[in-house]
Amino acid sequence: MRIIYYCDAGANALGVMLNDSQFLPLQDIAPDLPHTLKGLLQIEGWQATIEQRLDCVPSPRNIKDVRLLPVLPDASVIWCVGVNYKEHQDETGRGKQDQPMLFIRTSHGLIGAYDEMVCPRVSEQFDFEGELAVVIGKAGRHIARENAAAHIAGYAIFNDGSIRDWQRHTTQFCPGKNFEGTGPLGPWMMTADEFGDPYAQTITTRLNRETVQHTAISAMDHKIDALIQYISTIHTVRPGDIISTGTPGGVGMHRKPPLWLKAGDVVSVEITGLGTIRNPVISESSQV
């Protein structure tokens, strides 16, 4: 099942994808369920409830007729994993990490799967980072690795747009990771049962249709179950929390010369079996 969050005529709502182009508004399927994904994930058996009602709804709608929003705009926490692929470890010179390198993004920078990414006026060092995002669906603390899968609701695609000079202001990454308009998330959350084995898939980032990142997700260093175990030791993970699992090598910062995003570019991130997000890039000064 694929869940979208969209805006139509000024109203925000959840939808259920029927195929790559058609969806059903959740309010037509199950008006008694919450109308945000974070709220929905807190309802036990929400997926089964929707599946039971899919045949009793009006005609589907076309996804092109609405604007996709970030699928979880109100995520309580977005844990991001640094240098979690060997190629990225090598290009940064950081090497293999004994423990996950973690930092937090807030929801302020999240945008939709096809929205415009914004180059801030204070920097020209705007970089791309295609990533697989894991959405938590069941609360837990001190979760064992062998039980981690039971806490995953689904997966989405994330571009951890990074303002590199601001990222390097201190040893903490957060300033450069939280500019507004820099974090596309979507195009939907695909439930874990439909996505299947994430390590059977690949992730590809393209800039103006040219491939700039490509790797098998199986090349991830700290695997998803280990990340859930580690983070749930710090605090209780809750429905609607996100873990973005890191980017492969090929980021713009470590190219010679550096390859920065600029107004007029189009950057996309594709994960096989999951979908694609595609975002034009604009300058902050061009925003109305």
Image (tube, rainbow, N blue to C red):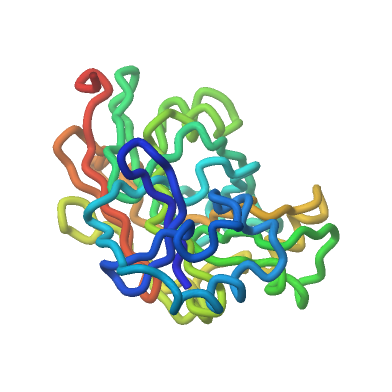
Q: Can see residue 248? A: no
Q: Position of residue 71 (x, y in %)?
A: 46, 51
Q: Is residue 45 above or below residue 64?
A: below
User: Which residue is depicted at the point 56% across and 35% down?
Assistant: 106
Picture coordinates of residue 160, whole percent (x, y): 44, 45
Tell me: residue 198, above or below residue 178: below
Counting from the top left corner in percent of width and height, residue 120 is at 33, 24
Residue 272 at x, y = what percent? 36, 74
Vertical placement of 124 versus 208: above or below?
above
Q: Is residue 50 left or right of residue 146?
A: left
Residue closest to the eye, 29 or 142: 29
Q: Quadrant of residue 60?
A: bottom left
The answer to whether one can see residue 18 in this image is yes
Q: Quadrant of the C terminus?
A: top left
> Is 38 on the left or on the right of 87, as rendered?
right
Res 244 quadrant in image: bottom right
Q: How many marks?
A: 0
Name which residue lies at 46% across and 48% down: 92
Specify whether 87 is left or right of 62. right
Q: Nearer the viewer, residue 253 or 105?
A: 105
Q: Looking at the image, which residue is at 14% across and 37% down?
A: 264
Please give the name of the residue rendered at 44% of the width and 49% of the height, measured from the top-left corner: 13
Identify which residue, 65 or 154, lies in the foreground: 65
Which of 31 and 133 lies nearest the eye of the viewer? 31
